[in-house]
Image (spheres, rainbow, N blue to C red):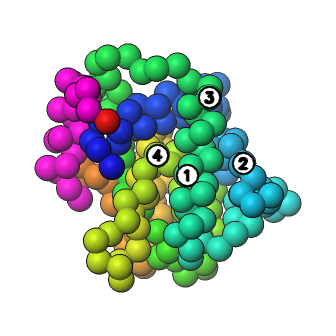
């Protein structure tokens, strides 16, 4: 994926998340639904089950095709509902952080749900409305990395889960790959015309 596409999707997701969290009561103790408002049909079935107190997928979290289908669906919804992004958007990064989530690393024990006040789901995955890119690794043995936009007010939920998630699936992009993060900042300051 080109850097310009990555940053365009990032900015679009920041705007999307901002819309969905307007008026949200951050003092509440249950964050399970605020960024799971998009529940696309994948092969005729809703992505999330809605019959539980916490987020649960209706499909396997151990299949790359599931992540691809869900990401494609949520990006299509955003494309249809959001206008083009402004030309200079680097200040948006002050509103949150980019999370790198290594997919398919879960024990399904539920500790992430508890520690994150239901922000993370049963399989330790961030909410679908935060997703914006999926990077498959060059070595087939490694699971893909899902990039998510996490607003500053939800950072503590990820940090709490990180302390207890034994698979080490979470990392902040600015810490994990500072060089790539710097390229993102530069692209946001001066968007390229390439796609």
* Precedes in sequence: disc 1 or disc 2: 2
Q: Gap between marks 1 and 2, in whole Å?
A: 11 Å
Magenta-drawn stretch, dominant element (helix, strand or loop):
helix
Left or right of 104 on screen, residue 3:
left
Nearest to the observer: residue 10 or residue 156: 10
Which quadrant holds residue 54? Answer: bottom right
Q: Gap between marks 1 and 4, in whole Å?
A: 7 Å
Q: Nearer the viewer, mark 3 or mark 4?
A: 3
Task: Specify the label residue 132 is tagged with.
Answer: 4
Task: Specify the label residue 71 is tagged with.
Answer: 1
**Callout 4 environment at 10 Å: few (<14), some (14 to 19), or many (20+)?**
many
Question: Mark 2 highlights which residue?
Answer: 39
Residue that appears at 52% across and 69% down: 64
* Precedes in sequence: disc 1 or disc 4: 1
Residue that appears at 47% across and 64% down: 161
Q: Gap between marks 3 and 1, in whole Å?
A: 14 Å
Question: Mark 3 highlights which residue?
Answer: 80
Q: Considering the numbered disc 4 on the image, is that residue within a helix, a strand or a loop?
A: strand
Q: Considering the numbered disc 3 on the image, is that residue within a helix, a strand or a loop?
A: helix
Q: Say if mark 1 contacts mark 4, CB within 8 Å.
A: yes
Q: Say if mark 3 contacts mark 2, CB within 8 Å.
A: no
* Precedes in sequence: disc 3 or disc 4: 3
Q: Gap between marks 3 and 4, in whole Å?
A: 15 Å
* Precedes in sequence: disc 3 or disc 1: 1
């Amino acid at each position: 994926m080109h850097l310009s596409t990555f940053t365009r999707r990032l900015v679009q997701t920041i705007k999307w998340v901002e819309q969905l969290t307007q008026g949200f009561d951050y003092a509440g103790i249950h964050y399970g639904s605020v960024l799971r408002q998009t529940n696309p049909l994948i092969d005729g079935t809703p992505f999330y089950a809605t019959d539980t107190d916490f987020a649960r997928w209706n499909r396997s979290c151990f299949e790359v095709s599931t992540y691809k289908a869900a990401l494609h669906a949520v990006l299509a919804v955003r494309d249809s509902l959001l206008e083009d992004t402004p030309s200079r958007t680097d200040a948006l990064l002050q509103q949150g952080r980019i999370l790198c989530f290594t997919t398919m690393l879960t024990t399904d024990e539920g500790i992430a749900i508890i520690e994150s006040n239901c922000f993370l789901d049963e399989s330790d995955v961030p909410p679908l409305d935060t997703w914006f890119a999926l990077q498959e690794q060059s070595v087939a043995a490694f699971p893909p990395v899902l990039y998510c936009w996490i607003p500053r007010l939800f950072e503590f939920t990820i940090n709490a889960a990180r302390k207890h998630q034994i698979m080490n699936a979470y990392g902040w992009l600015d810490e994990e790959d500072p060089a790539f993060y710097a390229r993102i900042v530069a692209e946001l300051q001066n968007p390229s015309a390439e796609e």
